Image: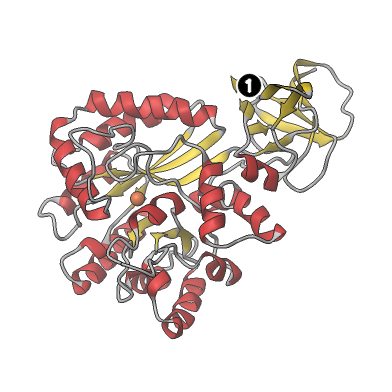
Amino acid sequence: MFDLILKNASLPDGRTGMDIACQGGKIVAVEAGIAAEASEVIDADGYLVSPPFVDPHFHMDATLSLGTPRMNVSGTLLEGIALWGELKPIQTVDDIVARALRYCDMAVSMGMGAIRSHVDTCDDELKGVEALLQVRKQVKDYLDLQLVAFPQDGVLRDPTAMANTVRALDMGVDVVGGIPHFERTMADGAESVRQLCQIAADRGLMVDMHCDESDDPHSRHIETLAYETQRLGLQGRVAGSHLTSMHSMDNYYVSKLIPLMVEAGVHAIPNPLINIMLQGRHDTYPKRRGQTRVRELRDAGITVGFGSDCVKDPWYSLGKADMLDVAFMGLHVGQLSSRADMDWCFDAVTSNSAKIMGLEGYGLEKGCDANFVLLQASDKIEAIRLRAHRIAVVRRGKVISRSTPIEHVVTTAGGRRIVKD
Ligand code: FE2
């Protein structure tokens, strides 16, 4: 007698007609034709079951704040940062908690299992940190929330940012963040990377920096991040987020840079929805796309996970916690159109991001946590094509979100027909 059996599922690796049995919050069998009884049986009807979506880059302290206190008129990163600076002093811990919890519910309904959220540490009251530590505890049974101490205004540029970032880590924030391209000078940017990586090494923590989110081809802080990673022995524990300047860099320089990143085992987190919106704003035409070199990074062996970055906040007005939207945009902007490339884009919002976050028990093998999402699609590519409807979301063997498959009743002169996605 199992807790849950999911019958007749297609799996991300292409197997079809598979059953998944869950007991005690774990997957205990993945095979065709499991005959045992279960407290709950779900018929997958041949649809795709995937491990949960994983968002490796988000800003939960700002989410769902759109329009408060005003809109971003220019649409640029810098006006977004200025607008966030206006919101910070007027929001309360309770405001941030309420918005974050609303977002977590939305994310769970979209099949999200884990989120890495940056939290701004340039605030002497550390309201965002206090709020998101509370949220992390409140949501832990249905969502893994990993927090990054993020000195939004520059850890060296803002006079109290370093002390506040260290204090946030002392309070229990998981990962060391940074924003070297926002420091006053290139030299200060490099120094911020050096100091922050040292803090991570001393404390045994991971690092995830907003790095070179700029159209300036000379913004090369990823080089310093790779250097410090290998110098301090942090291989596999460091990620560079955005890396948009790589789009505009000289090809010869990139031919040196990517092997340095490989040597350091640095992961890459592009944020396709936000950077296609924010980058190239100073260009006339041709207008740069501004997404980092996803194909080249991947082909070199670097783990690449797509992040969503923002939903309804000072930087981005849209979004609905849908990692398939993120994969869809990343695929287009990166021109990742072969069958193998499209298939990989699904991995970039699931298994690759789980690896970057260091999630344990992730996957659909026997012994993994019984966490998965049933999608109304036959395979990974169709899931991206349709931004497929989420039929059921399972966490530790229990259904935590459920909806009926979508079908449309079309009535025309030709008659009445049922059309499914
Ligand atoms: Fe970000």
Q: Quadrant of residue 51?
A: top right
- Answer above or below: position of 228 versus 210: below
- 4 vs 149, left or right, is right
Residue farthest toward the front in the current orientation of the protein? 413
The quarter of the picture where the N terminus appears is top right
Q: Is mark 1 within 8 Å of ligand 1?
A: no
- For label 1, the residue is 398
- Answer above or below: position of 222 versus 124: below
Q: Secondary structure at mark 1?
A: strand
**Rendered location of residue 421, percent (x, y):** 69, 32
- 138 vs 5, left or right, is left
Residue farthest toward the top in the current orientation of the protein? 39
**Rendered location of residue 384, percent (x, y):** 62, 45
Q: Quadrant of residue 270?
A: bottom left
Q: Amino acid at mark 1?
A: Lys
Colouring scheme, one of rainbow, by chain, secondary structure, one colour? secondary structure
Closer to us: 147 or 6: 6
Please say whether residue 349 is visible from this viewpoint. Answer: yes
- At horizontal 71% and vertical 33% (from top left) the residue drawn is 27
| Neighbours of disc 1 within 10 Å: few (<14), some (14-19), many (20+) | some
- At horizontal 29% and vertical 58% (from top left) the residue drawn is 199
- Answer above or below: position of 396 versus 277: above
**Rendered location of residue 28, percent (x, y):** 75, 32
- Answer above or below: position of 286 versus 64: below
Q: Quadrant of residue 86?
A: top left
Closer to us: 215 or 229: 215
- At horizontal 23% and vertical 68% (from top left) the residue drawn is 189
- 49 vs 362, left or right, is right
Residue farthest toward the left in the current orientation of the protein? 159
Please say whether residue 137 is visible from this viewpoint. Answer: no
